[in-house]
Amino acid sequence: MSAQSGPIAPNEPADVRILELAVDHMRRFGAARLTIVAIARDAGMSHGNVYRYFPSKEALFDAVTEQWLKPVEAACRSIADAPDPAFDKLERIIVSVHRSYRDTLESDPELFELFCRSVEEGRAIARKHRTRLQSEIQRVLEEGTGGGMFDIADQRRALALVFDTVYRFMSPISIRLDKDVPRAQMEGRCDRCVRLTLRILASGKI
């Protein structure tokens, strides 16, 4: 997403333009140096008008974070809705989230850092994102149990197991810590952990 400075076009929603400029400013200057005044100037409006759409800089940061997390969540929903076996869906969801996070860490580190900060601060945007991922994984676990692929007596324990065993690959904080580990190596580790998780879910010990 690239933004050009200049007044908002008549057919472009102001909030969309503000978000585009916020992303552009973060990429160029970093979140710490982003100012509402500078964004307003490039949008051709007063900073008071920016606050009509985003009441604080933190609200703007949350909107930017939500914007790139939506496709991550949509991909998980699409996988969960697919007519594939539950074990395949679960693996694909975990791998999809891991790759999406890693992609953003590598291509947009400032945006990824915003997400990490929202997780560390327990902000609503991070909690809602995690809840949505949990919901899709829960759907797959229930489907797999109903179809006989998983032998699960306690769905809550099974969900906790999934997040415990693949934490390193679905936690943005852990992914940030592993940024210097070669990508292929991390994906290989993820694959092994997922396969172990699938065996446990099918074992009848949950």
Image: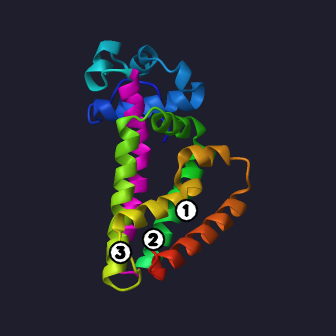
- Residue occupied by mark 2: 90
Amino acid type, label 2: Leu
Q: Position of residue 73 (x, y in %)?
A: 39, 55
- Residue occupied by mark 3: 153
Nearer the viewer's eye, disc 3 or disc 1? Answer: 3
- Residue occupied by mark 1: 165
Asked if the residue under mark 1 is in contact with the one under mark 3, i.e. CB atoms within 8 Å, the reply is no
Secondary structure beneath disc 1?
A: helix
Nearer to us in this view, 157 or 95:
157
Read off the magenta span.
57-85
Q: Position of residue 45 (x, y in %)?
A: 33, 17
Coloring applied to the structure:
rainbow
Q: Residue 140, relative to residue 170: is it above or below?
A: below
Q: Residue at x 73, y 47 (%)?
A: 180
Q: Residue at x 44, y 29 (%)?
A: 21
Q: Residues within 10 Å of mark 1 (few under 14, many from 20)?
A: some
Q: CA distance from mark 1 to mark 2?
A: 13 Å
Q: Residue at x 59, y 52 (%)?
A: 102
